[in-house]
Image (cartoon, rainbow, N blue to C red):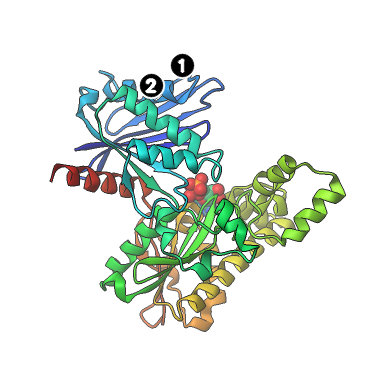
Amino acid sequence: MKILVLNCGSSSLKYQLIDSETENVLAKGLCERIGIDGMLKHEPVGKDKFVSNDPLPDHSTAVKAVMDALVDPEHGVIGSTLEIGAVGHRVVHGGEYFANSVLITEEVKDALRKCIDLAPLHNPANIIGIEACEKLMPGVPQVAVFDTAFHQTMPEKAYLYALPYEYYEKYKVRKYGFHGTSHRYVSQECAKLIGKPIEELKIVTCHLGNGASICAVRKGISVDTSMGFTPLDGLAMGTRSGSVDPAAILYLMRKENLTIDQMDHILNKESGVLGISGVSSDFRDIEAAEGEGNERATSALDLFAYRVAKTIGEYVTAMKGVDAIVFTAGLGENSATMRQVICDYLRYLGIELDSYNNSQRGKAIEITTRQSRVQVFVIPTNEELVIARDTREIVEGLKK
Ligand code: ADP
């Protein structure tokens, strides 16, 4: 079955068409600037790339543009959209409603609408994407795969905030956690590499990209994670502050007369390693600036690594031990220096890096020596593949 995987953001749409039997990607691409002007970048495997600047006034037009690109005689990869057997959607927030991926029904859409308050930028785009597919591919089953679902197994002591309990009851203010699809995938791949059932393992997974989060995975389930009610909490990130004393935020708002929206923008877009370094949100730029002697770049990288290492330590405590640590996502997969600095903090766990393996790129690999008491791995994440697998499983279950 060919599965279209869609990731609808507020003004973008990423897609992959995956053959679920071979798990090969047939085409992938990206619509950007939806609602502004519009740009489609389409990359069919084995054919030339294609870029279009046709206007994309809304997500429906963007989904239609993707379908047209997929069947185009020149750069298409299928003869007809009827070949698409199912659509898998990445949905950011499933609240407390969804602990697993689900077939999209009217009830599911109602629940997604109830989660809009929790993810006002993301969930509306997801719902529009789902409805656009319903219109363009009537009858084709659609599945929602949630960023939050994997973390629904966290115990109450991990997800409750020490705020008046009524705010949890009234507004469901609690820790949800994000990047769940990635943490689930890399922890399962890690168990395969170790060659033991995941039920016997304690794994800390570090998803370090523009957004960054860490997860404690015990016996294959998430028991704690560093993002919270929103993806702003926890580690310092590209432009997001991560955890800050809440009183510091109130203080700044009073001092600078900031509105809620202005503070929101500062915390989400002007903080993190960009805010500290003043250089960039991209770790490659910051590492380069450090190389040229920029002290604030060094401060940003130091702070980032320190907080990652400290959070790993917390999760070792949460699980009362650790068998393996996994690095994934843009920075986690690519920066040998960052991994080295983080692992230096963790020598007390008996971690010994293998510097040759740590310098390798682009494949799943163990980066510790045989003597290391905890195994450390780099495992490239693949959220689209997980979405395609979940979609296939749910759709095949319908036929039984
Ligand atoms: P997201 O999906 O959250 O946007 P990614 O997982 O693609 O992010 O990670 C993007 C980040 O990864 C970039 O901001 C960049 O800082 C970092 N990155 C990518 N390649 C490298 C590299 N070779 N060295 C250091 N950092 C890198």
Which secondary structure lies at badge 2? helix
Q: Judge by depth and name the residue closer to the eye, 98 or 224.
A: 98
> In the rendered image, is residue 290 in sight?
yes
Q: How crowded is the residue under tag 2: few (<14 C-alpha within 10 Å), some, or many (20+)?
A: some
- The reply to whether residue 21 is visible in this rendering is no
Q: Residue at x 69, y 42 (%)?
A: 265
Coordinates of residue 266 in the picture (x, y in percent): 71, 46
Q: Is 309 above or below relative to 183?
A: below
Task: Give the residue at x 54% y 23%.
Answer: 35
Q: CA distance from mark 2 to mark 1?
A: 9 Å
Label 1 is placed on what type of residue? Answer: Asp
- Numbered label tally: 2
Q: Viewer-proximal residue, 372 or 72?
A: 72
Which residue carries the number 2 mark?
65
Residue 321: x and y in percent read 44, 80
The spot of residue 69 in percent (x, y) is: 33, 23
Which type of secondary structure does the marked residue at label 1 adopt? loop
Q: Amino acid at mark 2?
A: Ala
- The quadrant of the picture occupied by the N terminus is top left
Q: Point out the residue furthest to the right here.
A: 255
Name the residue carrying label 1. 54
The reply to whether callout 2 and callout 1 are in contact (CB within 8 Å) is yes
